[in-house]
Amino acid sequence: MYRKQIEAITKDLNKKIVFIVGPRQVGKTWLAREVGKRFDNTTYLNYDSFEDRQIIKDESWTQSTELLILDELHKMPGWRNYLKGVFDTKPENRKILVTGSARLEVFRQTGDSLAGRFLTHRLMPFSISELQEDSISSDIERFIQRGGFPEPFLSKDEIEAKRWRNQYIDGLIRTDILDFERIHNFRTIEMVFELLRRKVGSPVSYASIARDVNASPTTIIKYIQILEALYIIFRITPYSKNIARSILKEPKIYFFDNGLVVGDDGVKFENFVALSLLKHIFGKIDYEGENFELRYLRTKNGKEVDFCLTNNNQIVEVIEAKIRDSSISQNLKYFCEKYRLKGVQIVKELKREKTIREIDVFKADSYLKKLFL
């Protein structure tokens, strides 16, 4: 299936190294190969392959290579210096595309800097906005239950989708995490992963999780950072004009694979909305250079709104997600009236869209179709 970002990636290859990053099995390799078909001579090399690894180390690809695709290169020791050297000495007409399922920016502390030499494209699961020209985009329940990863989403059989997810979880835990960093207590990170699946949408206390799994809060923070770096989870922190204070407050955790969420329909829907908004923000950052962030609002006395979009640390819109209640959330009303904010309530099951006291109530699918990606 066509991915919306292919044109922008092809264009950026004429400027710098292009990184395609995102969760495992989201379609990065497929997309890279599709881009490769647009060039007369493409060489694809995967660092996980022994034969390809030797070619990469020796830089022994053919001199006629127009597009060089390097998959999972971040697993190579000293890959940053290596890639800098390859880029700085390449023929003028050669393009370089690098893919990986770990956030390449987490490796910035090692090796020489690639500053000014690369552009990043974050590939996310399918969204209603991306697939809006396809009839399948109207099936919001499919997105919520199966998630937007290509294989389970496009599977004609629900059983096959479930089998894929079981294998996916096993691969995340037993392959990706161990490849990323040596873990001394493997069972603990498994327990943290399972706990987080059941805490989606709720403020997370590191100290509480530490007590539950009999580990230190420092260890919990480290494990959550690993899960983030591998595009398994993402954190949303409460909005504060004091950015340092905002980071210290309890975050909410969401999953890139909606099918991993354990909870009721409301929790799964909230995760899907969070992921859709995050994909929208990544698009605004990667393709328009905007300084967008996804936050949530919470007061000391517990008033909370699910999400807020900010640009340059100024709130653009506050958003509440509901399954079927068309009456305006009292907390949403409170924040909008007190701080004069633009408010939106998106509802999965809604008969009629309306505006009440300058707060827009939208059907979920119609609102999500308007997002960037």
Image (cartoon, helix red, strand yellow):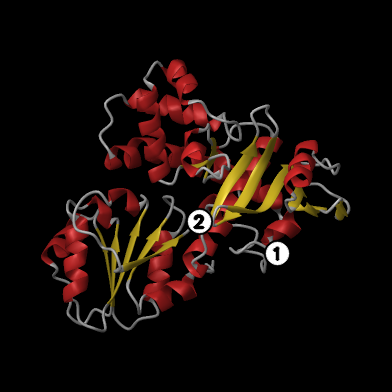
Confirm whether residue 256 shows in the render: yes
- Please provide percent x and percent y for residue 251: 53, 35
- For marks 1 and 2, the one nearer the N-term is 2
Mark 1–mark 2 distance (CA, rounded to whole Å): 20 Å
Name the residue nearer the viewer: 32 or 347: 347
Image depth: mark 1 or mark 2 in front: 2
Name the residue nearer the viewer: 309 or 74: 309
Q: Is residue 308 above or below residue 182?
A: below
For the C terminus, the image quarter is bottom right
* Lateral position of residue 309 relative to residue 187, left or right: right
Question: Looking at the image, which residue is at 36% across and 74% down?
Answer: 36
Which amino acid is tagged 2?
A: Met
Question: Looking at the image, which residue is at 26% across and 79% down?
Answer: 94
Count numbered badges in the picture: 2
Do the CB atoms of the residues marked 1 and 2 lie less than 8 Å apart? no
- Please provide percent x and percent y for residue 52: 20, 61
The residue carrying pointer 1 sits among few (fewer than 14), some (14 to 19) or many (20 or more) residues within 10 Å by Cα, namely few
* Lateral position of residue 79 relative to residue 178, left or right: left
Question: Looking at the image, which residue is at 37% across and 39% down?
Answer: 226
Question: Looking at the image, which residue is at 15% across and 64% down?
Answer: 55
Query: Mark 1 — residue?
Result: 135
Which amino acid is tagged 1?
A: Ser
- Please provide percent x and percent y for residue 98: 32, 63
Query: Mark 2 — residue?
Result: 124
